[in-house]
Amino acid sequence: MPSAFALPALFDLGATFAFALTGTLVALKRGYDIVGMFFLALASGLGGGLIRDGIFIQGTGTTPLLTDPRYIEVVAAATLAGALFGRQIKRFHRLVAVIDALGLGAYAAFGTDVIPEIRAA
C-alpha cells in the first residue's frame, strides 16, 4: 500500500550532506588531508543511512545509498565545502550542532517514509 505522502529524496541527500559536513569539520579539526576528510565524511555521511537501511530492508532490496551516485557527489560537495570554508564554519559551534540535528531529523523522517514502501515491494 503506497503512502499518501512521499518525502523527496532531497531529504535524505540533505541529511547526508549535513552529516558529511560534520565529518569533514571533525577531520579538519584533527588535521587530516583532503583524502582523510573525504573518507571521514563518507563514513559519517553514509554510515547512519546504511545502518538504518540494513536493519529495515533485510533482503527485500538494495539501499539507494549504494546504487545512487548522487550520494557520493553530495559527500564530495560537503568535503569540498568543509575544506574551503571549514575555518570560518568552525567558529560557529552551535551552527554545526544545528546542522547535525537537522541531519538526524531528516534521516528519521526519510527512514519512516521509505521503509514501509521498501517492505511492501
Image (cartoon, rainbow, N blue to C red):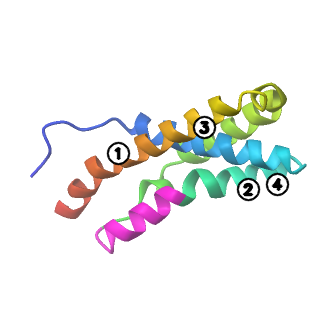
Residue 43 shown left or right of residue 12 in the figure = right
- According to the picture, the residue beneath numbered tag 2 turns out to be 39
Above or below for 50 versus 83: below
Q: Amino acid at mark 1?
A: Phe
Where is mark 1, residue-wise? Answer: 110
Which residue, given by chain and number where applicable, does mark 4 sit on? Answer: 36
Toward the viewer: 102 or 67?
102
The kind of residue on which mark 4 rests is Gly
Q: Is residue 66 visible?
A: no
> Within 10 Å of the Cα at label 3, are there few (<14), some (14-19), or many (20+) other Cα atoms?
few
Which residue is at the far front? 94
Asked if residue 55 lies in the magenta stretch, the reply is yes
Q: Earlier in the sequence, mark 3 or mark 2?
A: 2
Report the residue at 13% width, 47% height from top. 2
Q: Secondary structure at mark 2?
A: helix
- Say whether disc 4 or disc 3 marks the residue closer to the N-terminus: 4
Instruction: Confirm whether the magenta stretch covers residue 18.
Output: no
Tag 2: residue type? Phe
User: Is residue 27 in view from this perspective?
Assistant: yes
Which residues, given as a range, are shown in magenta? 48-60
Q: Which residue is mark 3?
A: 97
| Left or right of residue 66, residue 97 in this image | right
Residue 12 placement: quadrant: top left
Q: Nearer the viewer, residue 102 or 20?
A: 102
